[in-house]
Amino acid sequence: MAAPPHNDEQPGHVPPPGLRQTMRWLGLAAATLALGMGTAGILRRHRQETEVRQWTAAAAIPTVSIVMPQPGPAATRLVLPGDVEAWYEAPIYARVNGYVKDWYFDYGARVKKGDLLAEIETPDLDQQLRQAEADVVRAKANENLAAITAKRWRVLLETHSVSQEATDEKIGDLEAKTAALAAARATVQKLEAFESFKYVIAPFTGVVTARKTDIGDLINAGSGHGRELFRVADVHEMRTFVQVPQQLAAGMRPGLRADLLLPQYPARIFPATVATTSNAINRGARTLLVELHSGNPDGLLQPGAYAEVHFCLPRNFKVLRIPTSALLFRKGGLKVAVVGADNRIELRPIKVGRDLGTQVDILTGITRFDRVVNRPPDSLAGGEIVRIAGQVAPGAGPAGENPDAERAGAEQRPQACSQVPP
């Protein structure tokens, strides 16, 4: 019979020791490799998840741009409409009835105090004066007769020829006639005073701004029924009246400088000074009436003119200016978003002053060194962490800027109102 084939797996067959050691090491290496590959995969996945979380968290932080509040210019220009009026201006009416006999000054004529403007014919008044003078003559004659009679009766009383009662009557009649004479003379004096009003006189030195009569016009006395004859204005100095909003009324003090700009003189500036205010707020308009005085040596300022009044308000260092794009309209009112030292948002309520269009004055709520978010998103909330796009150091401005030095320099560099930006 043939011998059976060799079979290593037959029972009782034992591999050589070298082969068993090799197989053991190969199995251990394979297990180690598999474990390493699994561990590496787990670590790589964990790292990727961490990176995704970090990227997601970083992407969730909004990026904002900031601005630094700035003080206003050294002087603030406030422009308001004003009405130019004469220093004195008076309508001239007749005090007597009659007809215009002649007039001597026309529109634009310069007159002095006491100059004759016009003459009025008064036939009725002349007749009344002549009658009053005749009444004086009659009253004088009656007084003389009463005086003679009273003197005679006193002599007769001494001889007991007349009674005391009759004598007292004669003396009383004398006193009545004397009083009648005084009344007649007073009437004459009154009519003579009215006679002087036939001459219309300039009340002060100035310019005739209106003539509303002509020769032959019927004149009625007084301002109630009669019409205005002339109007005279004293224009050596002018008054300008301005209604200033209540919000700005605190800055209106005597001595405050201003410039007047008139449409008919676009290249001319007329300096003016605040003289006084009404010291009362108009209930209807909530404004303060301010009076300014300005010289008028060349007579270019005219009564009734419209003027732009440019006030030079001194800088208020408590007022800061930011762009209007930084404002947040929230339920509690106007606010701004301020970035804190830890880059967290703080929503601060503010009080707004003047609105300049692209900029707005802030009265309270922020400081010069606050980092204010410009164009904040509507979803921005208080306490939220933000990323700043382009760091701006506190006290933004040229390197080495000193706010105190800037303030002192501004106070030493006055500017004309026309050179100050609004």
Image (tube, rainbow, N blue to C red):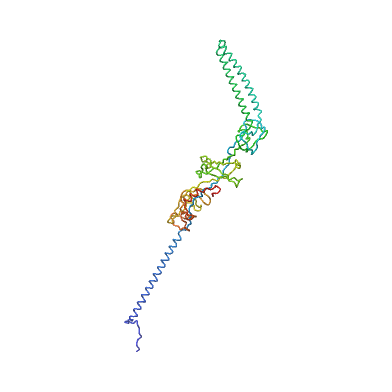
Vertical side of 50 occupied by 199: above or below: above
Tell which of 232 and 405 is nearer to you: 405
Vertical side of 217 occupied by 346: above or below: below
Q: Position of residue 107 (x, y in %)?
A: 64, 38
Tell me if 320 is positioned left or right of 217 in this view.
Answer: left
Tell which of 106 and 230 is nearer to you: 106
Tell me if 308 is positioned left or right of 45 in this view.
Answer: right
Q: Position of residue 110 (x, y in %)?
A: 63, 38
Tell which of 200 and 358 is nearer to you: 200
Q: The N terminus lies in which quarter of the figure?
A: bottom left
Tell me if 228 is positioned left or right of 408 in this view.
Answer: right
Q: Position of residue 175 (x, y in %)?
A: 57, 19
For residue 38, what is the image quadrant? bottom left
Q: Position of residue 160 (x, y in %)?
A: 55, 10
Vertical side of 190 occupied by 158: above or below: above
The extreme bottom residue here reads 1
The extreme left residue here reads 12
